[in-house]
Amino acid sequence: MMKPSLFLTLVAVFFMVTIKGLAKPQIDKEVDPITKLTLRNPQNGGSGVLWTNIPCSADSDLAGLVTPIFFENGEVTISIPLKRSVCIQFAGNQLFPKSKIILCPGDHLILTADNSSGKWSFGATGDNASGNLYLLDSTLFAGYRWLNEYLTILRTGKGKAELIDQVGSMLDMELESFLSMEKQGDISDAFLSAVKAEMQQMVLHAAGLAVRNIEETNRLRQKAKELYFYYLERYSPLAEMYKGSEMSLHNAGTATLRGYKNLAGGKRIDIGLWDGSKEFFHEYCYLPDDVQIRLFISKIQLLHFVVGSITTPQYVEKVALLGKVVGSSRYLELLRSFIDLNDPSGKNYSRGLFFYDHKFDKLEELGKEVGENLPEVIKRFFPDKWVLVDVWATWCSPCKKEFGYNQQLHAFLEEEGIAMLYCSIDEPENSDNWRNNLSAFGLTGYHYYITSKAEKELLKIPDFRMLIPRYLLFDNKGKLVHANLPRPSSEKALYEEIEKLMQGN
């Protein structure tokens, strides 16, 4: 996964809606349908915060604003007005997993999550429950899945027209289950259209990632670029039909960063938000001003709360700049409310090796500034021991989803006598957020806070790529025997592969 995910601590802002004048309905004045979402996790009970990108306007305006919603006694209900369907994304924590669902105007959806057995299971009732239950139980909107399938098609060596047909067939196949549900009356036409729109944006996202991830011939790389530009035109993220898509805003920004200036006609519109530095994405000036504003909001939250590369004072400065540019805005109040909620510039943990005990919430330093050479660190600290390495980061949502399988994984590793080493490639400044994630996900065991500074050193490892989550296995002599094991969610596939490698060593 590339940078990206969502954050877990903090304090509240609710989107509650009051509709006035309902006693005397005005026929000539349209009232936006109220959509309700109820989330339950009675097994965990108690209270807690879950983050999600609830739209900031009735027009399904997803600005990357990440809104905290509060569970009380294991339940929360939120109400929002919607004019159109929207795909929203939850952060993953102990209350609810990392996931996307679709809400349509006027729906009341009730979702129940249970992770008491170490695996997530779900229940759903209400409007479009069947469709959302399918989304929760699948990886349909997972970026890595679309990228892998897209790369497989791209590498067949066929011509452009044939490749486009194959991608179209892939989309049709993924839609079959939803078409069947719609035919049976289990989901609405609006829900089906929203699923299709999100899937098309996932294809565009995969096409963009493929350009960067192709390592074969220049000819194949050129073909990947041609297809990317084709899908940019076909599934333009600025099109009205994608307004409620969770992925469309990201795709619009990515297109300009990759040198594509024609989404909005190729004209530069500098509204004063970008300082020309790489960190603040001056290429976004080629997008409409409202899209620039939404991307700016998304980026400052991402860089402050998730990546940790800008401090609280810098975040405050950026929010103030936004206020000067836009004047009054429905975004500003929410952005300002985040200022004192989460400051990732707390205790700075040096790069090194640690042991975390979740039972006592204690982090013990085993080695300070141990270097960036992962194989050497394993030889030094794990002599005569097989080691499974989980390369992850706090901004990596798929990484966190895999933590849901830790109970089974750790039981297997203990039985086989294998040590588990979590290797974080977070930004060095994000150490406080990294520490909080150890607690939030109960990551008992060894941790190597190697940080993003070690990218060049990590890429020296044979067959290693900076696509995470990634799982490596080292034998009891410190030799790398596998650089890309199956994910813990594959369970049997991972365990059998490890057993085979140990038997053959």
Image: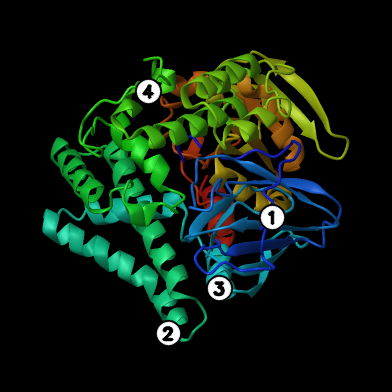
Report the residue at 52% width, 49% height from top.
501
Q: CA distance from mark 4 to mark 3?
A: 40 Å
Q: CA distance from mark 4 to mark 1?
A: 34 Å
> Do tag 4 and tag 1 residues touch (Cβ < 8 Å)?
no
**Marks 4 and 1, the one that precedes in the sequence:** 1
Dividing the picture into quarters, in which one does residue 272 lie? Answer: top left
- Residue closer to the observer: 30 or 106: 30
Q: Position of residue 421 (x, y in %)?
A: 65, 35
**Marks 1 and 3, the one that precedes in the sequence:** 1
Q: Which residue is mark 1?
A: 18
440 above or below 39? above
Q: Residue furthest bottom?
A: 184
Sort mark 3 into few (<14), some (14-19) or many (20+) by Cα contacts within 10 Å. Answer: many
Judging from the image, what secondary structure is the residue with disc 4 in? Answer: loop
Q: Which residue is mark 2?
A: 183
Q: Position of residue 367 (x, y in %)?
A: 71, 17
Q: Which residue is mark 3?
A: 128
- What amino acid does circle 4 point to? Ile
Q: Which residue is mark 4?
A: 271
Report the residue at 74% width, 50% height from top.
94
Q: CA distance from mark 2 to mark 4?
A: 47 Å
**Marks 4 and 3, the one that precedes in the sequence:** 3
Q: CA distance from mark 2 to mark 1?
A: 35 Å
Report the residue at 39% width, 24% height from top.
281
- What amino acid does circle 2 point to? Lys
Q: CA distance from mark 1 to mark 3?
A: 25 Å
Dividing the picture into quarters, in which one does residue 265 lie? Answer: top left
